[in-house]
Image (cartoon, coloured by chain):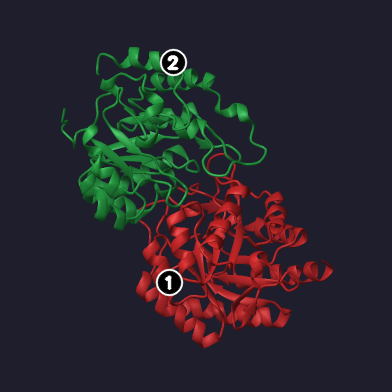
Chain colours: A red, B green
Amino acid sequence: MTFKNGWNGRVAPEVQLSPKKLTVIAGPCMLESKEIGFAVAQFMKNLCNELGFQYIFKSSYDKANRTSGNTMRGPGLEQGLDWLNEIREHFQVPVLTDVHTPSQALEAGKVVDIVQVPAFLSDQKQLLKACAVTQKTIQIKKGQHSSPEQLIACADAIAAEGNPKVMLCERGTSFGYNNLVVDYRNLVLMRQSGYATVFDGTHSAQLPGAGQGQSSGLREMVPSLCAAAIAVGIDALFLEVHPHPEQALSDAATQVQFETAKTILERSKKLSDFN
Amino acid sequence: MQQNTNSKPSRGTCFIDAQHAHLHKAIPSLLKAPLHGLHSWRVGATEPVSAFAERRGWIQPIGNTVTTPEQIERESHSFERLYIPGEFCRQGDVLSAAAQSGKTILLERGAFLAPSDILRAVDKLGSARERLILVEAGSAFGYSDRVLDPRSLHVMATLGIPLALNLNSLTASVGVPYQHRPTWLSDAEFDLAFVQTALAFNTEYLILPTFRELSPKALALWIDSCKESL
């Protein structure tokens, strides 16, 4: 038994979360195309293999809550799940995506290994309940406005539905307007709760809504934020990676390019070995 | 007395959660008209919509909190007003479905959202903006607390859209409170300051607390200030 409620951390045949072996969850923010998804999955899988990390691919099929209504949202549920399934089959890696309604949770749960509850919706119990029903692993992003206690209560709500496979993810807390800070105390509390603990290094660097109709961010902060999280202690590191972040259709200011991802993971390797 | 259910309520109207209406018996009947089923964070804690709709005859019109397009399609015929919580204020599909419902929409600014960014959410509603009431519910200030920022009220008040102040969000801690949250944050003595601030920015409506009465002084000020339009 590794985590709370007797869960052994297994999210797929290929990956078992463990405090003793860091898992990397990485992919493009939006699944802009199958080609971009494949390119990132290929690079990250090879990199994680080299460094001895487990790897999970992530991407969103629908950015349903963008700052502006005039921006791209993604390929949509059906196309997006098809591409995620292809990536899963081709690379033999677990895949993760986020859902926004109970009906989406049930559909996504048929394909992906990990269903993610977005931060804005992290307190929505009907959504959590639907996610629990999928019997897949559920990752809950902590709301930027939520206390760590609230996040843990949401995880308990999923467990109470008979699904102990819950991951908690820190991604920054509102600190005034258009700004986030990372409260590393939350990682300590999340780990003490017994649930698998994840740190989202790229969203934590966001400056929400600060970019004239879109979110801006402090990409240069991502490596340091990640290093601090590894030092505190986490079970998985979450990163959004894009071949050309400046051209990305969402979160262009915080996604990291391949070389930066490599630098972050090499440093993570040293730090996690030290731990 | 039936009201024109698709029109906006009179200035000064207080919105009351149906399950907590007993807390506000002191409020004159003319203020009690519209109800609003405040969102509950616990699964199953809210009264089933069907049961609520059955007994709705005692007071009209009513509203309900909506969080998914499917819910809006399924339930909006039972309600005259749709309340979109702050967490959903940018969800494109929810806003689109609410716009298509033809109902009056109360859209809460998310506690995480910069005041000027609410206009981008309003844009997602298209022409339904004409049926919109914006709700100020405070800005995130640490865990389990919100502050009322006059700059936010100023920005929202200049958009030309009627404004409501959610006193429940400003005084209560939703869900599981942060373990170190000071208890004095919910004291009723602050109600008067909230109402004074609301009136200073021409706020037209109040959403009342669900866990205690509004302070008598605050209520008296509100009624006195709005009695002509009521």
Q: Is residue A248 visible?
A: no
Choose between B4 and A119: the one closer to the eye: B4
Instruction: Describe the element under mark 2 as helix, strand or loop.
Output: helix
Amino acid at dot 2? Pro
Give a yes or no on whether discs 2 and 1 share a subunit.
no
* Count of numbered badges drawn on the protein: 2
Instruction: Describe the element under mark 1 as helix, strand or loop.
Output: helix
Residue A172, given in percent of the width and then of the height, sits at 60, 51
Quarter occupied by the C terminus of chain A: bottom right
Residue A152, given in percent of the width and then of the height, sits at 61, 54
Front position among marks 2 and 1: 2
Label 1: how many Cα within 10 Å (few below 14, some 14–19, many 20+): many
Choose between A170 and B2: the one closer to the eye: B2
Query: Callout 1: residue from which chain?
Result: A
* Quadrant of the image occupied by residue A63: bottom left
Please name the residue that numbered disc 2 is placed on. Answer: B216
Query: Callout 2: residue from which chain?
Result: B
Amino acid at dot 1? Ala
Name the residue furthest right.
A274
Asked whether, in this view, residue B134 is left or right of residue A189, the answer is left
Please name the residue that numbered disc 1 is placed on. Answer: A108
Residue at image position (15%, 33%) is B4
Choose between B203 and B3: the one closer to the eye: B3
* C-alpha separation, residue under disc 2 versus residue under disc 1: 51 Å
Residue B107, given in percent of the width and then of the height, sits at 35, 41
Q: Is residue A266 above or below residue B29?
A: below
Label 2: how many Cα within 10 Å (few below 14, some 14–19, many 20+): some
Q: Is residue B164 visible?
A: yes
